Amino acid sequence: MHPEHARPAHLAEPAATVEALPPASSPRSLTPVRPLPEIAPLPLAALLHLGATDHPDTRLVFRSPVGTLTTDLGSLYARAARVAGGLAARGIGPADVVALQLTSRVHSAIAHAAVLLRGAVLLPIVPIYGIREVAFILRQSGASTIILPEQRAAQIAELRGAPDGLPALRHIVTVADSPAPPAATPSIATPSIATAPADNAPADTVPWEELELAPPLAPCARPLDDVAVLVYTSGTTAAPKGVTHTHRSVAAEVASLRSLRAGQPDFGYLDLFPPGHIAGLSVLLRTLVDGLPTVFLERFDAAEAIELVHAHRVTASAGVPFHLTALLDAAQRDGRGLGPLRDFLVGGASVSPTLVERAERAGVRAYRAYGSSEHPTISSGSAADPLDRRAATDGRVLPGSEVRILDPAGHDLGLGEEGEIVTRGPEQFAGYRDPALDATAFTADGWLRTGDIGRVDADGYLTITDRIKDIIVRNGENVSSKEVEDLLMTHPAVAEAAAVAEPDDRTGERVCVFVLPRPGSVLDLDEVRAHFAAAGAAKQKTPERLVIVADLPRTAAGKVRKHELRADLHAGGAHHLPATDGPS
């Protein structure tokens, strides 16, 4: 690799891994540290090779708006090896950053595997990000290559030619838009049904099918502590932050998730998380490394998802509350129910106990999980947990991870006491792409500051109660936004709710709630006040403004963008989505 193509300095020297910390004199986790399930100490390229060798017949289904494509893991790996060879032939070497912006189609899975087989740094970008976000990510990451739909290639080419440009970007690989699958949807073992050439792409781009014509490349060995993956956070509070993960930390995440499907020999999975989100990456890597039969849905549609559940005997899935609510609503309309689906991990946003209880009545054992891009899965419930634990806690700390609870002064708190959650574990990230952000991300002794508030009970269950910056301070009293939302969700007219602080001259802040009502339901502020009074809620927790919305602004992962709601309130304007205020 030419010197001018060397990896940026921060990627060349990742932060020390957790194992390098001196645990002997450090405060200890509130929960016992359970050993990780065994995984070979190999770089991701070697793990992908093992996965395809051990599970070549694993069935993979890709559903797009134009049809369904079925293949197996061995065939997908063969295509990825050829694409990796195509990348190598164009001078893309180990440690080059290769960005992908593709929906959950077969090309996305192949590209993820191909980049890792080449030993390059994988940078998946959320598909719905606009050109502004993509430009920021490409510039900051120093990506040398991007793989994306042909319809977006002209925008990237234009950016590259602008004065500030994209100086590191050398290749634009284009995938034809919405290719129709073959009529019989056979296994995609050969490039004969690869994507058609991109007719509308700029002249200096590389069509996807050219990469597949290369001879297959053997897995590229990389040191375990080299950066393997770079993901950008969803941006619920500010500009996206680049999060670096090593081969070791990503492999540890795959290992830690194995405990979630123990005792499920007929496991079949429906993937609802988008590529570019850490959860979407985790699902795909579990599929490729552990050989899990998986159905990928390119664009979420609840009715279509239920059809796939029945057609492919899907037993498990995961998503944000929006996904689970939509599935339950669609199943109720459909009349067939959710069939074989019995296991649903719900996370990525505040989860109301009433949602888990509703899923239980529909025959689905839903449970909560907690993590972040920086520490992907910190805790999780399981289908085996009792309903009260699944509905009201975020599960037990997963194998390998540790959790402490701190007071505002940084002192350790005990079981049952509420404070800031700090974590560490082998799947923790190596640092931010912008190293200046690391200073506030960790405690002095190296634990990750999550920015979340919670507690650990005597049985080892972790419960997230709020975000440090998601508290409403009314007359000097702290009001938990999550507590307000959970109580609102018990009202039969409420489908989804977000509570935020609204500036108020008299009280400093007051409780404002944005509510997405259930179809056909009517709700006003008097009814909300009566609901809180009947529940015995303190006066300061009772909403003082109600905004009815047709939808809520969300990140690509489904989290509500509360900072947009707050910004509109602080600016004194109405939210940009259709809304009406409740009576004052």
Image (spheres, grey):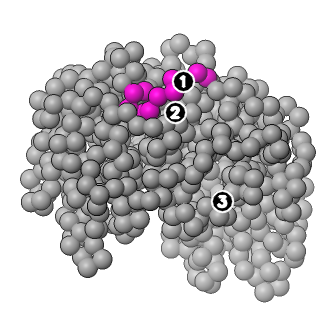
Say what secondary structure mark 3 lies in.
loop
Q: Which badge, 2 or 1, is on the more N-terminal residue? A: 1
Residue 4 x, y percent position in the rendering: 28, 61
Which is nearer the eye, 441 or 236? 441
Quadrant where the image shows the C terminus: bottom right
Residue 45 magenta: yes
Q: Is residue 313 left or right of residue 262?
A: left
Q: Is residue 504 left or right of residue 220?
A: right
How far is disc 1 from disc 3 in space, using C-alphas?
A: 28 Å
Question: Looking at the image, which residue is at 69% across and 26% down?
Answer: 35
Vertical comparison of 569 with 345: above or below:
below
Q: Which residue is mark 3?
A: 441
In terms of secondary structure, what is the magenta stretch mainly? loop
Question: Looking at the image, which residue is at 53% across and 13% down?
Answer: 265
Find the residue positioned furthest to the bottom.
505
Q: Which residue is mark 1?
A: 39
What's the amino acid at mark 1? Ile
Q: Which mark is residue 251?
A: 2
Which is nearer the eye, 214 or 505? 214
- Magenta extent: 37-47
